[in-house]
Image (cartoon, helix red, strand yellow):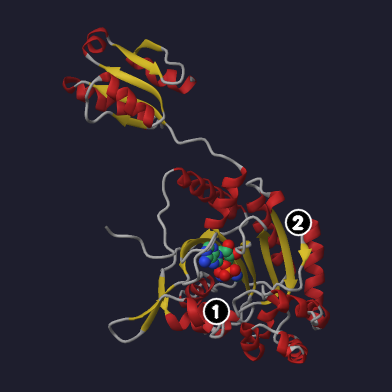
């Protein structure tokens, strides 16, 4: 017997209805904010992610599924979508003619993380990316879109919006030096991981979950006190616009994000309901990335939502109605054609129809219809054909009655 690969999973049955609910919802909402879909490859050259996400990030250092292709080049299953959208934006010259460009994408991402609640090696993201404006009004609109999309599932008491500014190449290096100095003074009390992070990626220490590190982090200098004027102004305006949009948020100076491309705005919609996997959606601004990957100097910002996590939250909150079949048709062998014709008419009218394929007794067919949650069963037998009146059974009330063939659709539409 074959088993699936660790950290990968099958999604089916009742769960699928939650996935459809989410899929229907973003496809309706995102275009109203001007986003159009972009479909991207799942496989990219490894170098794209190394350059895009950063070679000292956990994702690139240890989480990518990478293999050597026959021509000797290295390919990776995408661990996220931003680098791919930026690659597509540059490669297809989507920046011409200049305008604000907004894209959304949906699909599986792959990271070799330690599987746990809310954390998988294949997971799904819905993401958006907007190119062409540095205005904090765009940041605010994007944060509002994430906030609105998630709260529309009635999750307000499960979620918090947290925002931060992580500075820019002008102010962050100075802050970074201050931070390194501070942590050096407390070196002995840092965990082994943080000791390693100190030179390579000191900002990640702010994010460490180890208690002894958290104690040190509490008194560490914070980025918000060390922003340059441009970043400070940007962040002030962002907060003011967020108030105008009606977004409730907390400023959390310890948000650092696990990808290197961010500048200024960083945000996360977090929950306490999924153990250590707390972010349901997250993103930020990445103004230098398009240039870094070989394109023009155009600013960008976006976010991605973890669909697997969102499904878990919605399930905690609301139970969706079970899937049902509207009508289950039982026909006897000699009347199969009538059954086929009626099933076609009903499906054209939008009903969900199942035909009984392996006719046993009426009783066994009724059982099958029940297991499929059928609302009605239609019986087509000798009597029905000769009288032109079909037998319809309401599976909820158990009531059974005769109905003219040409009245079936109307009856189902009204009931
Ligand atoms: P990220 O924070 O790495 O950002 O991932 C975004 C979301 O994907 C997370 O908040 C989480 O809900 C979900 N996620 C990440 N890893 C896993 C996992 N192993 N299992 C389940 N869900 C997971 C990015 O990926 C950026 N590309 C977002 C972005 C877009 N920034 C700008 N534009």
Q: CA distance from mark 2 to mark 1?
A: 31 Å
Q: Nearer the viewer, mark 2 or mark 1?
A: 1
Residue 274 in sight = yes
Kindly give the residue lying farthest to the top in the view shown: 387
Instruction: Tell which of 184 and 398 is nearer to you.
Output: 184
Which residue sits at x=55%, y=60%?
306
Determine the quadrant in which ligand 1 lies.
Answer: bottom right
Graded by Cα atoms within 10 Å as few (under 14), some (14 to 19) or many (20 or more), the crowding at tag 2 reads some
Vertical relation: 153 (above or below) 270 = above
Relative image position of residue 192 (x, y in whole percent):
62, 85
Local SS, label 2 = loop
Q: Residue at image x 52%, y 61%?
A: 125
SS assignment at label 1 = helix
Quadrant into which the N terminus falls = bottom left
Residue 342, located in which quarter of the rendered image? top left
Question: What percent of the width, then of the height, locates residue 170?
Answer: 73, 88
Q: Are marks 2 and 1 in contact (CB under 8 Å)?
A: no
Front in this rendered view, residue 399 or 140: 399
Q: Position of residue 400 (x, y in %)?
A: 38, 12
Question: Badge 2 is on which residue?
Answer: 247
In the rendered image of this protein, does residue 139 appear above or below residue 58? above
How far from the left and from the top, in percent, is residue 347? 36, 31
Within 10 angstroms of label 1, few (less than 14), some, or many (20 or more) residues? some
Residue that carries the numbered disc 1 in the rendered image: 58
**Looking at the image, residue 310 lies above or below residue 401:** below
Q: Is residue 261 left or right of residue 232?
A: left
Task: Name the residue: 17% across, 23% down.
Answer: 333
């Amino acid at each position: 017997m074959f088993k699936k690969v660790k950290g990968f999973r099958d999604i089916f049955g009742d769960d699928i209805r939650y996935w459809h609910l989410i899929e229907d919802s973003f496809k309706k909402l995102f275009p109203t904010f001007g986003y159009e879909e972009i479909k991207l490859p799942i496989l990219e050259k490894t170098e794209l992610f190394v350059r895009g996400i950063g070679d000292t990030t956990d994702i690139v250092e240890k989480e990518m599924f990478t293999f050597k292709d026959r021509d000797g080049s290295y390919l990776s299953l995408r661990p996220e979508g931003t680098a791919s959208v930026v690659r597509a934006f540059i490669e297809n010259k989507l920046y011409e003619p200049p305008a604000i460009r907004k894209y959304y994408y949906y699909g599986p991402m792959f990271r070799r993380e330690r599987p746990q609640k809310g954390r998988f090696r294949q997971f799904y993201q819905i993401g958006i990316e907007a190119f062409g404006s540095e205005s904090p009004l765009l940041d605010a609109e994007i944060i509002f879109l994430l906030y609105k999309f998630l709260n529309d599932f009635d999750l307000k008491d499960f979620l918090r919006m947290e925002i931060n500014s992580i500075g820019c190449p002008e102010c962050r290096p100075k802050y970074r030096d201050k931070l390194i100095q501070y942590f050096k003074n407390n070196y002995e009390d840092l965990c082994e991981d943080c000791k390693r992070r100190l030179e390579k990626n000191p900002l990640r220490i702010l994010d460490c979950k180890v208690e002894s590190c958290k104690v040190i982090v509490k008194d560490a200098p914070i980025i918000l006190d060390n922003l340059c004027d441009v970043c400070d102004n940007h962040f002030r305006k962002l907060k003011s616009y967020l108030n105008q949009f009606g977004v409730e948020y907390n400023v959390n100076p310890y948000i650092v994000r696990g990808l290197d491309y961010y500048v200024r705005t960083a945000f996360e919609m977090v929950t306490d309901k999924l153990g250590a996997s707390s972010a349901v959606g997250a993103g930020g601004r990445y103004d230098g990335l398009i240039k870094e990957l070989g394109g023009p100097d155009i600013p960008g910002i976006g976010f991605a939502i973890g669909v697997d996590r969102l499904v878990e939250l919605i399930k905690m909150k609301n139970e969706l109605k079970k899937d049902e079949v509207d009508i289950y048709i039982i026909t006897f062998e000699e009347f199969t054609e009538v059954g086929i014709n009626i099933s076609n008419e009903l499906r054209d009218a939008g009903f969900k129809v199942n035909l009984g394929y392996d006719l046993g007794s009426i009783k066994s067919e009724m059982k099958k219809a029940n297991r499929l949650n059928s609302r009605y069963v239609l019986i087509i037998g000798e009597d029905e054909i000769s009288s032109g009146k079909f037998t319809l059974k309401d599976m909820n009330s158990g009531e059974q009655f005769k109905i003219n063939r040409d009245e079936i659709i109307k009856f189902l539409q009204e009931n």
